[in-house]
Image (cartoon, rainbow, N blue to C red):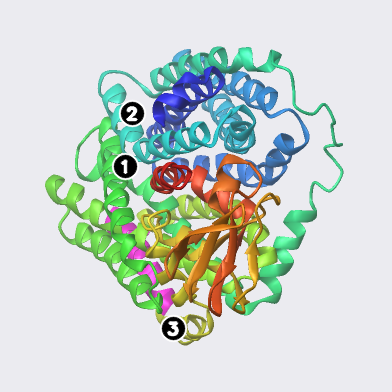
Amino acid sequence: MIRATFANRGLRRVTFGYLFFSATEYAVWIAMLVYAYEQGGATAAGVVALVQLLPAALFAPIGGVLSDRRRPEAVLTWGYVAQAAALSATAAALLGGGPPVLAYFFATLVTTLITITRPAQAVLGPGLARTPAELTGFNVLVGWIESAAVLIGPALTGVVLAFGSPGLVFAFAAGLAVGATLLVLPLVGRRPRNDAQEPITAGAFEDVVAGVRAVALHPGVRLLVLFLVAQNVVLGAFDVIAVVLALDVLDLGESGAGYLNAAMGAGCMVGAAATITLIGRRHLVPPLLLGALGLAAGFVLLAVYPTVAGAFVLIAVAGAGSMVVEVAGRTLLQRLAPSDLLARVFALYESLSQAAIALGAILVPVLVAVGGAEAALVAAGAFLPLLIVLRFRALRAIDEQATVPIVEISLLRSMPIFALLPAPELEGLAHSLTAVNAESGTVIIREGEPGDRFYAIADGEVEISSGGEPFATRTRGDCLGEIALLLDVPRTKTVTAATDVLLYALEREPFLATVTGHASASQAADVIVRERVA
């Protein structure tokens, strides 16, 4: 699968370009916070974080429209060009000893331009892939890169800062952005699949407005979005606290800020692995509370015992708790938000998250001025548990009313093609299933017709035939209709209900998106196709 992806010249170029991009994203963020702290302490670092993130939060929804209405390969390429230019300008301002405000301006431009990359790549990947295997490999590689960047990016920044300066980090990042540009530049000259261009202004703000209305009119959704945004306030605060800890409390030097952020990333990876236990869980407020307490314990204990060794361990604990909060909260939001507005709700959440990170960063200087880094750690740690205590009844009510398709999740987990999906994806897929009852003798799938649905058998027995000749039966836990969808061919067999049957149907688009987007599902699908075709 990975080999198939690298055999595709376009996907290979986009993958390596994204690797270079991810390496710069965390690096320049930490480097600029370190520089701002050197110029004016925690206050300067918080203000600079706010100044960088607010324009990005405002631009992100609009930037995403570009890739829907213009050729994504051109948007991606010119996005990298613009990032390289802004990174180079920032490096020149820092290394040349120019006024700090000039460096802050160009760094803000970098943060804003970075929001172009992911939407463009999300649209471009399917357009470059020639087979589902290639697209799966591409999505898996992107996932690996994003997970590793949380840990490796800050660690590499720490190494560069140990021997150089923030300006050197930006210069190195500019070189990577130029490399990303050169990698994807040949894609601009390829023949587009569709030359039609929609006006950028037409409907650019409708989805954002719809998301705001969905959140405002639904109290439960509003509370969950508020809670997840509050978590990002804590994470934004930690970005600045890490700099204060490294330079003023633990005496780790400039590189220490990168290493402490890497510890947070390592904890997040551990927490992500633990969230598999949330699959199909009826009540998610208890793990939400547990994650918030883990985040609080890590920060508060670090405030009480600020040692170098303890810092790395406790920050990792906080990172693990933060990831549990993130997954549990997002899953609850998936359960509660109206399905037709879910994408808009999450788009609004992503935009608010940028503003929340900025708010957290700007609050740290006030807390440090009042009680030092220890007060900032205690306040950041206590924020989420306090919010849970204040709104516990409302959260518990949400937990009770949120729909959990336990039967559907159990059925999907029993099928190899879906068994290893992450918790939110599996539950989201279960929500997309439609129950279908078929009486004995009903033709469910007819040979030669177009394939539009995947079926999972929940109860009863069906008979498989070809050319009018029966040759197999299927029962609970078996799947039907996947061959036509995976190979994009007409139905290869006829399926008739041998008894009264209960099936769960999944439409073509979510089925293919799941199979191509996850390595475990793709590999299981390949095995099923080989067995069924044989």
Secondary structure found at label 1? helix
For badge 1, the amino acid type reads Asn
Q: Which residue is mark 3?
A: 392
- Label 3 and label 2: CA atoms lie apart by 40 Å
Q: Which is more toward the observer, 146 or 262? A: 146
Question: Image quadrant for the C terminus?
Answer: top left
- Label 3 and label 1: CA atoms lie apart by 31 Å
The boundaries of the magenta stretch are: 370-388
Secondary structure found at label 2? helix
Q: Earlier in the sequence, mark 1 or mark 2?
A: 2
Q: Which residue is mark 2?
A: 157
Q: Earlier in the sequence, mark 3 or mark 1?
A: 1
Q: Which is more toward the observer, 385 or 66? A: 66
Examine the structure image and report whether residue 27 is included in the region drawn in magenta.
no
User: Who's the residue at 34% across and 58% down the image?
Assistant: 376
Q: Which residue is mark 1?
A: 261
Position of residue 182 measured from the top left corner of the image (x, y, whole percent): 55, 12
For badge 3, the amino acid type reads Phe
Position of residue 186 measured from the top left corner of the image (x, y, whole percent): 62, 12
